[in-house]
Image: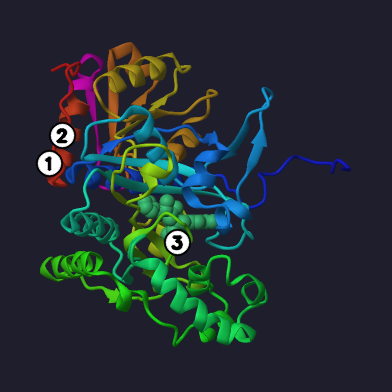
Amino acid sequence: MVEEPGPVQAPRGTKDVLWPESWRWEQVVARFASLAERFGFGLVLNPMFEDVRVFRRGIGDDSDVVGKEMYELTDRGGRQLALRPEGTASVVRAFVQHRPTTPWRAWYVTPAFRYERAAAGRYRQHHQVGVEALGTDDPDLDVEVVSLAVAVVADLGLEQVELAVNSMGCSECRPAYVVLLLAHLRARSDDLCDEHRVRYQVNPLRVLDCKTAACRDGTADAPRLVDHLDAACAAHFARVLEGLGSLGIPYRLEPRLVRGFDYYTRTTFELAATALEAAQNAVGGGGRYNGLVEQLGGPPTPGIGFGMGIERLLLACDAEGVLPAEPPAPDVFVVDLTGGAEARDLVAELRRAGLVAERAYDGRSMKAQLKLADRSGAPIAVLIGAQELRAGQVTLRQMGDPHGGQAQVARAQVVPELVCRSHHRQAAHGVPPVTRSEERP
Ligand code: HAM
């Protein structure tokens, strides 16, 4: 390959997230964590890469995610590895390896790698927040998991999000349905997209998930899996729908929602942000996978979970005009006209006392420092000039308010004074002040 001159760019389909956009990421993760923990989930951390068999066995070789999109590599020791294309199979691998007591509820935040055609909202490295709950097939847990996903989008302020649900049945009832579906597809195979015209037999359910107009038309009147569930799956699904109704969660029954992984059984669901382009409007999706633990070598253990794309959630927030980047301003900006040593020491004291303190560097002029103080959004600037230094004082200047005025405060009193002002400001904004053990009076 010929080396192109110039600086190296981030790989195609990836992006750097810089401040203040990254503040919104922090918000999504923090809000997700808080809600997931309220629902009884604890954080799990897994490696970014796994033995490739985790995904081959877990997700299925003929899925797009494994067959076409997985980043595979051989390490220097000859091990066949893959960068995780999603979270579920790794979390289940960890469950099988460590056998925590059930029910086990884990939440995660992770990058996921898929060699997809990069587009707006479709990345080769995207990021998911998600949960997995293992150890019970109780349909009330399905309702809880779906309601957590719905609570997450509501908490971000999103209103234009639709929930679609379906049941995939189980290994008992699905084969008979697949026979019916195959017969339908065989009769319509000429109408299907190029790929499925020849490959519909490999995994006929996948055709239902195909987004091409040809396959959508060709399957519009296909038999529906929900009409062919066995009694146990039908009862399970009825209880899930009843629970969603009881919790006041609106949903649409979507009989073609089969999702792109082989592990799903029974409940599947997806959240679509209608303010986004249809091709990339899924902000989250998930479902049950009652056979996955066994498939990865563990004892029969049912499970359910979902993943949500952080980038997609933020795109949906942009489209609805919610969650604008509002990184908090510092509490105070220190302007030092005596060489910088005073600012160095004072910001350290202020930070020890729990305040967010900023300063300027490189011995800038007063004008330049005040400009930075203004731009920082700090409500107060501490000015330290030669005269103040000699008198053992500082000047506190109210920023952003031409009538705010300024006051002289003894240097020894400036930290408690600013802590006190910060508490008053937070109380006025309804934020409880953080009391830190090291905070001095
Ligand atoms: P998934 O639907 O493949 O499910 O991904 C979950 C979410 O990740 C999607 O709804 C979407 O928001 C986001 N996402 C997926 N691919 C991309 C991409 N290329 N670029 C940007 N965002 C993307 C799973 O991964 C399952 N593990 C979910 C699950 C958990 N099922 C059970 N438990």
Residue 228 visible within the image = yes
Q: Residue at x 29, y 13 (%)?
A: 391
Q: Position of residue 362 (x, y in %)?
A: 55, 24
Q: Residue at x 42, y 54 (%)?
A: 263
In front of the other: 129 or 184: 184
Q: Position of residue 399 (x, y in %)?
A: 31, 42
Q: Which residue is mark 2?
A: 433
* Residue kind at label 3, given as amino acid type: Leu
Task: Tell me the distance, in whole angstroms, between the alpha carbons under discs 1 and 3.
Answer: 33 Å
* Residue kind at label 1, given as amino acid type: Ala
Task: Tell me the distance, in whole angstroms, between the alpha carbons under discs 1 and 2.
Answer: 7 Å
Instruction: Give the image quarter of residue 45.
Output: top left
Q: Which residue is mark 1?
A: 427
- Residue range highlighted in magenta: 400-416
Q: Which residue is mark 3?
A: 315
Q: Are marks 1 and 2 in contact (CB under 8 Å)?
A: yes
Q: How many marks?
A: 3
Q: Residues within 10 Å of mark 1 (few under 14, many from 20)?
A: few
Task: Tell me the distance, in whole angstroms, between the alpha carbons under discs 2 and 3.
Answer: 32 Å
N-term mark: 1 or 2: 1
N-term mark: 1 or 3: 3
Q: Residue at x 15, y 26 (%)?
A: 435
